[in-house]
Image: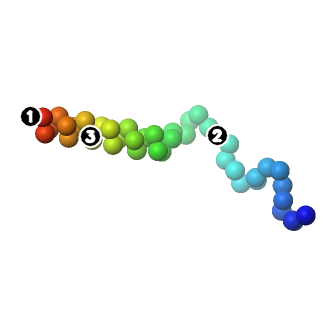
């Protein structure tokens, strides 16, 4: 068996509720921009 073959990864960060999801934040920003653009072109 390989030397460093462990069941769990040592360097893995545990899931924290405090840390915000970066992809979700990006999608929210994109939606916001799209809404602003639609409003601007609608005038």
Distance from Cα at disc 1 to Cα at disc 2: 44 Å
Q: Nearer the viewer, residue 27 or 20?
A: 27
Q: Quadrant of residue 41?
A: top left
> Helix or strand or loop: what does disc 1 sit on?
loop
Nearest to viewer (mark 2 / mark 3): 3
In the rendered image, residue 21, in percent from the top left (x then y), is placed at 51, 41
In the rendered image, which residue does mark 3 sit on?
34
Q: Which residue is mark 2?
A: 15
Q: Residues within 10 Å of mark 2 (few under 14, many from 20)?
A: few
Residue 43 screen position, x and y as percent: 9, 34
Label 1, on which residue?
A: 43
Whether tag 2 and tag 3 are in contact, CB under 8 A, the answer is no
Taking the image as shown, residue 13 lies to the left or right of residue 17, namely right
> In which image quadrant can residue 26 be found?
top left
Mark 1 in CB contact with mark 2 (< 8 angstroms):
no
Q: CA distance from mark 2 to mark 3?
A: 31 Å
Instruction: Of the two numbered discs 2 and 3 on the same chain, state the one appearing first in sequence.
Output: 2
Residue 10: x %, y % from top left: 76, 53
Looking at the image, the residue that sits furthest to the right is 1
Q: Residue 28: which quarter of the image?
A: top left
Q: Check disc 2 and report its element: helix, strand or loop.
A: loop
Mark 3 / mark 1, whichever is N-terminal: 3
Category of crowding for the residue at label 1, using alpha-carbon neighbours closer than 10 angstroms: few (below 14), some (14–19), many (at least 20): few
Q: Looking at the image, which residue sits at the far left? A: 43
Which class describes the residues within 10 Å of circle 3: few (<14), some (14-19), or many (20+)?
Answer: few
Residue 20 coordinates in the image, percent (x, y): 51, 39
Residue found 48% across the figure and 45% down from its top = 22
Say whether residue 17 is left or right of residue 38.
right
- Mark 3–mark 1 CB contact (< 8 Å): no
């Amino acid at each position: 068996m390989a030397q460093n073959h462990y069941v769990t990864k040592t360097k893995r960060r545990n899931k924290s509720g405090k840390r915000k999801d970066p992809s979700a934040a990006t999608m929210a920003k994109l939606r916001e921009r799209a809404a602003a653009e639609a409003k601007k072109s609608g005038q």
